[in-house]
Image (cartoon, helix red, strand yellow):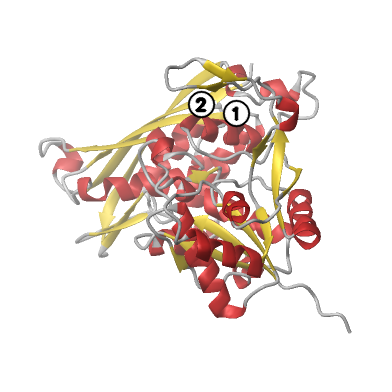
């Protein structure tokens, strides 16, 4: 009886991603309703259902990792093993992950993949596994479209390599496990830092095969990359639209810029917490309402619906319908966002203000922004939350309730 090849996928997620802009490390940022890491792990599982998954994380990111793992299906989570802790460099992080795999139950084949590449296709993953079996060490590569120049320290051209022989290398890079583990252990003693695992295999004397990569398998590094990823994930307009669908989905063609405004009020009732932006804030009272009474999310939902002229929350989720009693308001906001996506559009920005004497919103502002951004599939930099009082005037000044105002900017194709 022939034993099956044991395969593990090591996903490197320990970096800080500073070039992607301010906010969470890029692997934990939301991308159309899911974190980048959750999308990457789901893609790995789809391409290699038989493989085990191990993620290398920064020691400070346990909670962020757990939140991303919670977004996976039960079958996807079942493939995850205990995460490994990263090191000071990517090279050290990969070696830590490989050593952890060796302690678990060493696989025959390992694929090493960047967490910031969420678009690896099943076909690409299959090519990676086959190439590792056949060649021992292999990487995906795509041809270069631009001419490449080698320059000296003064900026003068030294040589123009033949671009037909050059490839831009991606991940997942695939190896027979004993080969790459030995190579990494040897590289740890070397005085240099390597930029990818193929270089480490090369330094150990291994021949590395390059198999066809995939242009859609790009790495999220800059804010522009996140915009491109949004384009790739945005559904096309309705089928009866005769325009070129690919052109319509690019941001530069979303030229119909609209704004919508939302306003909501909820009175205080007995309780010990209020919900703002799906974040629970301890307080002496709760808010009264048919759902969870998240006054902030209701205002934002109405603003999004207003921008696309789709009525208000009550038109989509009537308070007379008992199924919405106590429902989380995230359901309402997700629905509004899906309506925008269904029209080939995107939410460009949210600006909202909470009006109350108490509780204090400031200490919870970043958590609220992150929560709303995750629900809406936006970067937190596109969500602004402010808070103010009415100088003790009116019902909010008398601490009878909370009001919220919101403006949504939405871009649609013409």
The residue drawn where x is 80% and y is 19% is 242
Look at the picture and state if 72 lies above or below 164.
below
Q: Mark on residue 378?
A: none
Look at the picture and state if 316 lies above or below 64.
above
Tell me the SS state at disc 1: loop
Q: Earlier in the sequence, mark 1 or mark 2?
A: 1
The residue drawn where x is 48% and y is 22% is 152
The N terminus lies in which quarter of the figure? Answer: bottom right
**Residue 191: percent from the left, percent from the top?**
42, 53
Q: Nearer the viewer, residue 259 or 69?
A: 69
Residue 72 visible to an observer of this rendering = no
What is the tally of numbered marks visible in this picture? 2
Q: Nearer the viewer, residue 105 or 241?
A: 105
The residue drawn where x is 50% and y is 36% is 312
Whether residues under marks 1 and 2 lie with C-beta atoms below 8 angstroms apart, the answer is: yes
Look at the picture and state if 333 lies above or below 342.
below
Left or right of 48 in this view: 29: left
Q: Mark on residue 410?
A: 2
The residue drawn where x is 73% and y is 65% is 49
**Residue 92: percent from the left, percent from the top?**
45, 59
Residue farthest right in this picture = 1
Residue 164 visible to an observer of this rendering = yes
Circle 2 crowding by C-alpha within 10 Å: few under 14, some 14–19, many from 20: many
Q: Nearer the viewer, residue 345 or 89?
A: 89
Circle 1 crowding by C-alpha within 10 Å: few under 14, some 14–19, many from 20: many
Q: Nearer the viewer, residue 200 or 22?
A: 200
The C terminus lies in which quarter of the figure? Answer: top right
Residue highlighted by disc 1: 345
Rendered image quadrant of residue 22: top left
Tell me the SS state at disc 2: strand
Left or right of 213 in this view: 368: left
**Residue 133: percent from the left, percent from the top?**
78, 62
């Amino acid at each position: 009886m022939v034993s099956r090849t044991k395969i593990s996928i090591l996903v490197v997620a320990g970096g800080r991603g500073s070039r992607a802009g301010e906010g969470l490390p890029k692997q934990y940022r939301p991308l159309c309703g899911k974190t980048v890491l959750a999308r990457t792990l789901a893609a790995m599982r789809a391409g290699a259902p038989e493989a085990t998954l191990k993620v290398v994380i920064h020691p400070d990111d346990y909670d962020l990792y757990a939140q991303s793992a919670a977004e996976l299906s039960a079958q996807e989570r079942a493939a995850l093993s205990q995460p490994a802790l990263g090191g000071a460099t990517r090279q050290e992080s990969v070696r830590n992950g490989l050593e952890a795999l060796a302690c678990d139950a060493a696989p025959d084949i390992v694929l090493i993949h960047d967490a910031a590449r969420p678009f690896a296709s099943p076909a690409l993953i299959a090519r990676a596994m086959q190439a590792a079996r056949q060649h021992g060490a292999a990487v995906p590569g795509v041809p270069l479209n631009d001419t490449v120049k080698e320059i000296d320290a003064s900026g003068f051209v030294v040589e123009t390599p033949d671009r037909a022989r050059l490839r831009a290398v991606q991940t997942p890079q695939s190896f027979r496990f004993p080969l790459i583990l030995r190579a990494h252990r040897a590289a740890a003693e070397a005085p240099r830092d390597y930029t990818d695992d193929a270089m480490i295999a090369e330094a150990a004397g291994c021949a590395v095969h390059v198999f066809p990569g995939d242009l859609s398998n790009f790495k999220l590094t800059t804010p522009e990359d996140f915009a491109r990823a949004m384009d790739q994930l945005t559904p096309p307009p309705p089928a009866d639209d005769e325009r070129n669908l690919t052109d319509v989905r690019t941001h530069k063609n979303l030229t119909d810029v609209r704004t919508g405004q939302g306003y909501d009020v909820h009175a205080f009732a007995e309780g010990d917490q209020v919900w703002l932006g799906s974040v629970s804030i301890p307080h002496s009272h709760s808010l009264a309402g048919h759902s969870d009474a998240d006054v902030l999310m209701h205002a934002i939902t109405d603003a999004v619906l207003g921008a696309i002229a789709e009525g208000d929350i009550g038109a989509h989720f009537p308070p007379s319908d008992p199924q919405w009693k106590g429902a989380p308001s995230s359901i309402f906001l997700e629905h509004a966002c899906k309506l925008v996506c269904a029209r080939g559009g995107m939410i460009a920005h949210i600006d909202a203000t909470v009006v109350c004497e108490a509780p204090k919103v400031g200490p919870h502002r970043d958590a609220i922004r992150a929560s709303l951004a995750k629900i809406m599939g936006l970067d937190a930099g596109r969500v602004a939350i402010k808070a103010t009082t009415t100088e003790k005037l009116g019902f909010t000044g008398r601490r009878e309730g909370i009001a919220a105002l919101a403006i949504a900017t939405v871009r649609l194709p013409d």
